[in-house]
Amino acid sequence: MDNPAAPDTPAPSPVQAAGDKDAPLKEDIRLLGRLLGDVLREQEGEAVFEVVETVRQTAVRFRRDADPVAGEELTTLLHRLTRDQTISVVRAFSYFSHLANIAEDQHHVRRRRAHLMRGAAPRQGSVAHALCKLRDAGVPQDVVEDFFKDALISPVLTAHPTEVQRKSILDAEHDIARLLAERDLGLTPKEFKRNTQLLQARIATLWQTRMLRYSKLTVADEIDNALSYYRITFLREVPGLYDDIEEEIATHYAGEMSGKRVELGKAQYLQMGSWIGGDRDGNPNVNADTMRHALVRQSTTILDFYLEEVHALGAELSTSTLLVPVTPQMQALADASVDNSPHRSDEPYRRALIGIYARLAATARELGVGHILRKEVGEAPPYLDAGLFAADLEVLAESLRANHGAVLVEPRLAGLTRAARIFGFHLASLDMRQSSDVHERVLGELFARAGGEADYAALSEERKVALLLAELAQPRPLYSPYESYSDETNSELAILRAAREIRLRYGSRAIRNYIISHTETVSDLLEVLLLQKETGLMRVSSGSSDVMVIPLFETIPDLQRASAIMDEWMSIPLVSSIVEKQGRLQEVMLGYSDSNKDGGFLTSNWELYQAELKLVDVFAAKGVKLRLFHGRGGTVGRGGGPSYDAIRAQPPGTVNGQIRLTEQGEIIASKFSNPEIGRRNLELLVAATLEASLSPRPADDISNGKLARFEAVMAELSERAYRAYRNLVYETPGFTDYFFSATPIAEIAELNLGSRPASRKSTRRIEDLRAIPWGFSWGQCRLLLPGWYGFGAAVSGWLADGDRDERLALLREMHRDWPFFATLLSNMDMVLAKTDLAIASRYAELVADPGLRERIFRRITAEHGETLRCLEAVTGAGERLAGNPLLARSIQNRFAYLDPLNHLQVELIHRRRKLGDNADPRVHRGIHLSINGVAAGLRNTG
């Protein structure tokens, strides 16, 4: 937030600028920092601005020189700040953190455009690059086309308690990003000056806009927050990506196509999913009404989009039959319209679109849309489904193509037709999720009330399975409308009845998956099947189920049992019939967060890898296609890291054109709040899935014998890392007290981040703490412990137990030749680049017991050092992110405004805990602002 002179006239276009590739980024950050500084001076005064600068410079000196004097100066300086000054300083660094993210996003867009403008070879991660690789490897075009016709690639947006952005902030930041992008377009001096003024105005708006929510976030708020990303990115970028992919196939298989564009027909390989409003695991605020509300809001979002686009098409397609003919189908559609104006008698496209608009408006009202901006001309019947809407649009497109109007199809009509097929009237598939213990209680009550089994929960697994299968064979239900049931049972049954109602109303894609958390046995799956039968979602007579029953394997023991459970599940004749009707497809969800909290980073990744391989074998033996649903979070400790690398590093046979994965926390904002970056991230998912599914195994790939050696080493390392991690987290006396003192976990639990509680139970046991706030807390204090702890102990111990040089050479070979191990170390490298023991030591000072503080922080510090030494020995890189200098510079650039936020957070937590309930509300607000700013600065803390 320093105030260097900024140019008042436009600089050369950064796209064309030579020299330092990051120079435009630095210039943008300086500009936004100067404008924020100007706003700060105007709003808060020169004195506050000077305090902000002093804090920044002292924090830089503390980092650069590891200067204890600077640390003491910083402590004294922060102690002396008044409450109001503290809030202003925290806000300044938090907003600068957000502004720097905007500048970085714009720089990514700028670099990508510069690459495309040079006509350079396709970049890794693009569909074009993937197609080039496949073509050169001899994969024919028909195989590629079949992939897209059969594939399902689905990012699933979830609401978890690390999503901290308010919609008002998102809107303001979207405007700032747009204005920043305009500066690359060759503005005149007057336009450039006006642009700068508008930027300052939007930054002033940010400063005067409340960053935090003062009331607890509701499920409805979470739904609306997620839907804002559809309006910003998904509604246009998803159909646009489909078009790009068809063009890329035609380009890269030009010899086979003879210049013709590929038509993938009604393929819907990239579809959006959501948990928001349907995920009730541990969230008492989710029920049948929130599910209905979610679909009304989703439907409103997509129908508003369709209505706007149809209205715009009506203005654009002014074609007259006095000049150009139309097809008979087109004429019939126009004649069926509610528009009888003589002024448009020769304009069939407009008349048809007025009729389509009227039908859409009627559909919107039928589906619960409360307000339609433009009144339709007359009454028309609603569409029964989105396919009929798309079919009407196809009539227009075919008529245009047949009558010299093909060029008129692409600007809007083609994209709208594509959107109708992708999004339907439901927008995104809403998953249901609930914990297995809830299902057990509900069925226990149903059995008892029906006069059957009095204590279902006490039965052995064998007897449970027998009872459930016997009941599934009965045509009559257990439930009786004449009995009274607990609120929990009534709520769970109401949710499933609502799911059936939603499917009938919005289409079968609206709800098609039911996730079972804490799946430990086959009975956990059969229970949900029986509950579906009770509510009309499963029919005994046909052996079919409307909603797929999907196990979620989360803990280390669950992952180890996964393949055996699925083998037994698919061996049941009834289940086999259901799977057959699902297209011989079965989904399995794998949880990264809980397995990491349970067993640590290394063991979690290894157990996930093993579980996937065993599942592949079981599914192959059954002749069933496996679709994996990866429950990944933002942090590496929760399965985060680059999605492209993660998908390509999946074990052989685990992708096959089918993959779903969660997008959570700040990752949603960082990936999808900018349309171009959002499109790039969606393309990365498609390209990675395409490569992982179709790339032939290279001749120099790992042999089975070598892979077996690598896996044997990983098994040993995993066991050692597991012991080290469990010993620290679950077996060290006082560790829980240390964690609750040396991280802002208590303050995070108070923050109005999400509708879900931070813990499953009201205890301080780490076992009961949700994995998400667990990882979030370690990120805030800059230790990021779940992303690396145990690696150093595992590797150093294994090296010491044999010929060190020989074993180290083997680890280096694993890093070079095995994508799984290389990706694991790459992700850990990124985590360690963001880890800062000096900052973490200041959080450790919050632990009141000096003996406990010293004992545990010393262990963490020792393991951190050992992890760094072992990572460097294996990779040969003496610096973090040596292989990714762009990310290394990005992280390094963040420290100037991230470090002060951490120091301020420690000071505020100290004040709050000292004063307890008597703490000024402004102290609470300052802590929460700092949490927001640190989360934005780290970018993948969720």
Image (cartoon, helix red, strand yellow):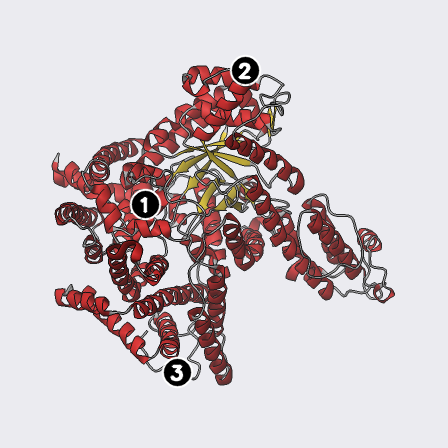
Q: 330 and 851: which one is in front? A: 851
Label annotation for residue 25: none
Mark 1 Cα-neighbour bin, 10 Å: few <14, some 14–19, many ≥20: many
- Residue 564 at x, y = what percent? 40, 23
- Residue 277 at x, y = what percent? 52, 44
The reply to whether residue 366 is visible in this rendering is: yes
- Rendered position, 118 above or below 801: below
Q: Which residue is mark 2?
A: 451
Q: CA distance from mark 1 to mark 2?
A: 44 Å
At 63% from the left edge and 52% from the top edge, which residue is drawn? 300
Tags 1 and 3 touching, CB below 8 Å: no
Q: Which residue is mark 3?
A: 7
Question: Does label 1 or label 2 sit earlier along the sequence?
Answer: 2
Mark 3 Cα-neighbour bin, 10 Å: few <14, some 14–19, many ≥20: few
Q: Which tag is nearer the camera, tag 2 or tag 3?
A: 2
Q: 825 and 724: which one is in front? A: 724
- Rendered position, 690 above or below 448: below
Q: Is residue 416 left or right of residue 344?
A: left
Amino acid bearing label 3? Pro
Mark 2 Cα-neighbour bin, 10 Å: few <14, some 14–19, many ≥20: few
Question: Does label 2 or label 3 sit earlier along the sequence?
Answer: 3
Tags 1 and 2 touching, CB below 8 Å: no
Amino acid bearing label 2? Gly
Amino acid bearing label 1? Trp
Secondary structure beneath label 2: loop
Q: Which residue is mark 1?
A: 774
Q: 244 and 597: which one is in front? A: 597
- Residue 340 at x, y = what percent? 86, 60
- Rendered position, 517 above or below 315: above
